[in-house]
Amino acid sequence: MTSPTGEIYRVDWLPGTDILHGTCHCGAEHTAQDPIEMWGWMLAHPEGHAPPQQGSPEQRLPRR
């Protein structure tokens, strides 16, 4: 068994939509309809990742 890395990735489905909202362990956020696209974005860290306040509007969603 390997030791934990401490990196937490989170993907939430937004009810009533086909949209997934992902949060990387660095705090960057991204939305996508395709789960493969979402995991590709997460695993590409740090490429395409910016802190939530600096991300593009497509990368930000209001927290519920």
Image (cartoon, grey):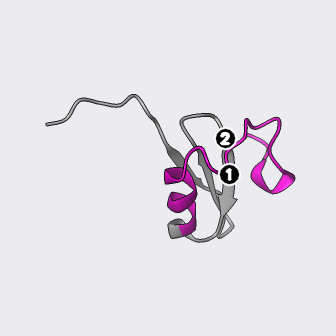
| Residue 4 screen position, x and y as percent | 29, 30
Magenta residues, start to end: 37-64
User: Is 9 in front, or is 2?
Assistant: 2
Relative to 57, residue 52 above or below: above
Q: Residue at x 55, y 46 (%)?
A: 45
Task: Determine which residue is flagged by label 1.
Answer: 48
Query: Would you say the magenta stretch is mainly helix, strand or loop?
Result: loop
Residue at the farthest front position: 47
* Total count of labels: 2
| Residue 6 screen position, x and y as percent | 40, 28
Task: Determine which residue is flagged by label 2.
Answer: 28
Is 7 on the left or on the right of 14, as rendered?
left
| Residue 29 screen position, x and y as percent | 68, 45
Amino acid type, mark 1: Gly
Q: Residue at x 35, y 31 (%)?
A: 5
| Residue 28 screen position, x and y as percent | 67, 41
Q: Are marks 1 and 2 in contact (CB under 8 Å)?
A: yes
Quadrant of the rendering where the N terminus is positioned: top left
Is 43 on the left or on the right of 49, as rendered?
left
Indicate which disc, 1 or 2, sits on the residue closer to the N terminus: 2
